[in-house]
Amino acid sequence: MLALDDIRHEFPILDRTIDGRQLIYLDSAATSQTPRCVVDAITYMYFRHKANVHRGVHTISQEATDRMENARERVRQWLNAESSDEIVFTRGTTEGINLVASSMGDTLYNGDEIILTVMEHHSNIVPWQLLQRHKRLRLRVVPIDEHGALNLQAYEDMFTEATRFVALTHVSNVLGTVNPVKEMIAIAHRHGVPVLIDGAQAAPHMAIDVRDLDCDFYTLSSHKMYGPAGVGVLYGKRRWLEKMPPYQGGGEMIGNVTWERTTFAELPFKFEAGTPDFVGIAAFGAALDFIDRVGLERIAAHEHELLTAATQGLMEIDGMRIFGTTPDKGAVISFLVGDASSYDVGLLLDKLGVAVRTGHHCAQPLMQHLGVTGTVRASFAVYNTLDEVNAFVAAVKRVTSILLR
Ligand code: PMP
């Protein structure tokens, strides 16, 4: 097991300085940093095993294929899916949701309803809105209370004869709320409605068991899980994936092609048109090994400690407003101080070496609901320390005292 103290050495970027100050990276919800072992896996793949996958008889092609398919099996175990046929590699969460919306869209008709929540990321809003170009679909939106918890009664009351699909985030990238997805999936299933869970912010921080959740689809992004960018996973129950038409056409996804008729490949290849990012996929396997060596439970406990310290520290600042105050939040904290703009706070924090996210966080409907145009968001990962949190709180105090003078 990798000791928490040794972890920082795995991330050379954390040694950087910004304007002469030590970098404090608090933007891991946007993308996490990448440990040496993952970058080494990329280098190794490029230097030793680079050949196109699934189609060569030669040795290197076979090796590359094995590495990609081993990663698929690794992801299957990670998510506790029944079969690796249910693991589709994508470019990320966004592509996974677009794939499902596009393929499922074929089965929707005028008047059908889709349930989303007010805290969705744009990537779980816009793909559904795109379907509205061709069909009169109604998007119904589950509201939240003042702490940022979903109103489960309102959710249950939303189901009608016309409800065809539910798509919701597991953890909010703004509020940190961890939604009771298992319960919500069970409610949807009682109405015969399938559910997609956007796991972009959950998968880096908690064990995901798709069979226990009984979700129909689950999406995640490698780059938020210490892995490379450009790789993601869509888990889908076999019975849905088998029924769904392909999302894109091209090489890899076909059985046989003639001018008259094309048949499609078996799962999961039916949904993986073109040469996949086999290097990134193999390296994502190395990222999962890294998380395992640290231990997901230890990561979660460490992040929780950082979040608690940050929350307590920030609350001492006059005029502090924290958005999202449910118990057992994920590792993000969104806030505003007085009428200081999130942009100004972020810019000045950067001058002190502190990297945070500012703005609408790709969740503009949530911002409208909160009555703000943006927030400052700090997010934590395994490599952050309590010293960094204390320095961050001190920096926020300093910056806001200047801005609100
Ligand atoms: N959903 C949520 C909740 C997110 O936080 C993000 C990333 N900010 C996404 C979806 C989109 O992920 P990606 O850009 O990796 O596709």
Image (cartoon, rainbow, N blue to C red):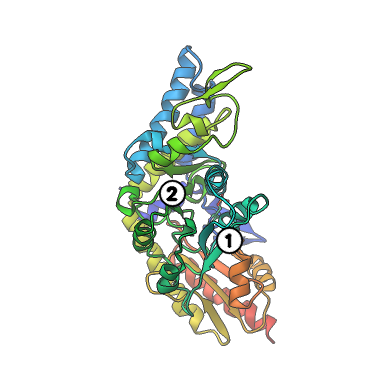
Which of the four quarters of the rendered structure image does ligand 1 lie in? bottom right
Disc 1: CA contacts within 10 A as few (<14), some (14-19) or many (>=20): some
Label pair 2/1, CB-CB below 8 angstroms? no
Q: Which amino acid type is marked by label 2?
A: Tyr
Q: Which amino acid type is marked by label 1?
A: Arg
x and y, in percent, of residue 168 in the image = 48, 59
The one nearer the camera, 79 or 40, is 79
Q: Nearer the viewer, mark 2 or mark 1?
A: 1
Mark positioned earlier in the residue sequence (2 or 1): 1
| Residue that label 1 marks | 138
Residue 40 appears in the picture as rendered: no
Check residue 218 in the rendering and tell me which mark sits there, or answer none.
2
x and y, in percent, of residue 189 in the image = 36, 56
* Quarter of the rendering occupied by the C terminus: bottom right
Q: Residue at x 61, y 18 (%)?
A: 260
Q: Residue at x 47, y 12 (%)?
A: 57
The one nearer the camera, 152 or 335, is 152
At mark 1, the secondary structure is strand
At mark 2, the secondary structure is strand
Check residue 99 in the rendering and tell me which mark sits there, or answer none.
none
Up/down of 190 relative to 66, above or below: below
In the rendered view, does 324 fall on the left or right side of 258?
A: left
